[in-house]
Image: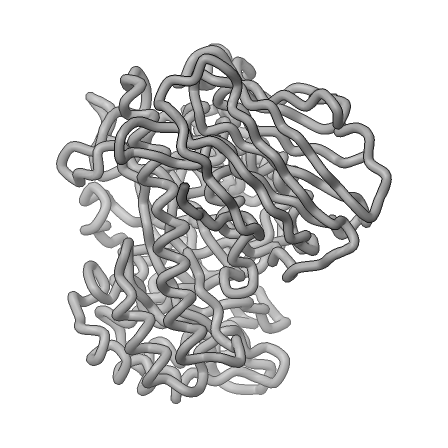
Amino acid sequence: MRRVLFSLLATTVLASPSLLAAPHQVKIDADLTQQGPVINKDIYGQFAEHLGHGIYEGIWVGEDSGIPNTNGFRNDVIAALKDLQVPLIRWPGGCFADEYHWREGIGPKDQRPVKVNTHWGGVEETNAFGTHEFFQLTEMLGADAYINGNLGSGTVQEMAEWLEYMTSDKNSTLANERRANGREAPYKIAYFGIGNESWGCGGHMRPEYYTDLYRQYATFLKAPRGLRPKFVASGGQQDQTEWTEVLSTNIKRDMAGISHHYYTLPKGDWQNKGDALGFPKAEWLSTMVRTYKMDAFIQANVAVLDKNDPKGKLGFYLDEWGTWYDPEPGREPGFLYQQNSLRDAVVAAVNFNIFHHYAQRVQMTNIAQMVNVLQAMILTDKEKMLLTPTYHVYHMYKVFQDATSIPFNISTDNYGEGDEQVPAVTASLAKGKDGKLYLALVNLDPDEAASISLSLKGFKVSALSGQILTAEQMDSHNTFAKPNQLKPKAFNAKLSALRLPAKAIVVAELK
């Protein structure tokens, strides 16, 4: 017997054989009158980098495009993202951020310099989508802004002036330049990242060196009262804790949180990551095992924060996460386009349940990325558009945005073979902003169903009503020819007869 923690609970995972003749047995106990931390809406944040067709052709097509648009923004993509209730968007990168010079993306579009995107495909970057266009996007979607500043190749002055340009309400030259470019009122920025992946593409720095640079840059980043964003430090990746240790020990002001990055690679090899479709069952398991490592990585870093920041002032932000596969043959490898299947949907839901468990510290995450890049919500091909299985999971889980978590205990069999083991079922339980009680269940096993026993105190609950996402095939996905092949269906069940199909995600209201 071993203990596993996830989704606002203490979980007992019972040893089980790799192949089960009967459904997994899962028991969940909760007192529905109890309350845990609020699940910050920003856990459902998105990421839009200047990468491949993520922005150009994905979100932005320009005013002269034959694709229906409003001020250059694709109408179909904007409508789909509005329905998703996107709370937060991170921009302009990613690695791109540390080569981005903001002045090149303001003013008349025909006068903006054309650069080369050296990180992603070596293609031309027209700078047609810049600061003003980004904020138009956030305002169209009702989302908050997360700006990533250029620490790697920029200067303190450049970063400070960009923040002043965006947020100043004074009669300064920079504020008046913003007004001349069409924006009278200051922009509101929720988060401002000082650099990105400083251990890698952001400068290959040591955490100690970056810490000194962070303190220097943060000193000069100024904004009016009420418009000052939360400053985010560039942290570590995967199982690293040293960045969190050094940053939380040595930075005592102007830091709201520390970022962290982790991508799920089916094979765990950056040179041979695995395919998005047509994968063997062994890679379904390896994907689940590797994505579930997120729990241990967060737990280790939260332990560091609890030691160095016992008052809980610092957040732990997973501002890049998701699946990453080998590029499709015939496509530009640097564009990071990949298909999105039921497996990706299960990965997303498993991570949501993990994030919910650590909601006290994990207050913001950004999946990579929003459109046409890696684990995207939306794929486009010229005038065509489709919603991915991951989009549908975000849509199902939006009831958890700013919901109040409810602690619970869960006992579940394992799914796996040998040392490759994960809980067969993970869950979330919360009271939504609408006052309703919501339960999310995820079955990680692609073959075996799960029998769920719920023991709920405090309220009389007899049934569940919501949605389910599942399919026969592990790599079931949507195509431009069949865009609705995989989408949620209605789910209704009695509490006394709750059965979760294999490789399925359920989000339901308790009634």
Foreground residue among 340 and 501: 501
In percent of the image, x 52 and y 82: which residue is there? 223
Q: Quadrant of residue 465?
A: top right
**Percent from the top left, x then y, of residue 267?**
22, 33
**Percent from the top left, x then y, of residue 360?**
56, 64
Q: Left of 221 or right of it: where is 120?
A: left
Most extreme residue toward the front, as rendered?
1
Foreground residue among 424 and 208: 424
Q: Quadrant of the N terminus?
A: top left
Most extreme residue toward the left, as rendered?
271
In percent of the image, x 53 and y 24: which residue is there? 504
Query: Eyeballing the image, is 149 above or below 137?
Result: below
In percent of the image, x 58 and y 59: which residue is there? 144
Q: Quadrant of residue 194?
A: bottom left
**Percent from the top left, x then y, of residue 452?**
63, 28
Q: Quadrant of the C terminus?
A: top right
Residue 268 appearing in the image: yes
Residue 58 appearing in the image: no
Q: Left of 456 or right of it: where is 7?
A: left
**Percent from the top left, x then y, of residue 391?**
53, 33
Foreground residue among 61 and 317: 317
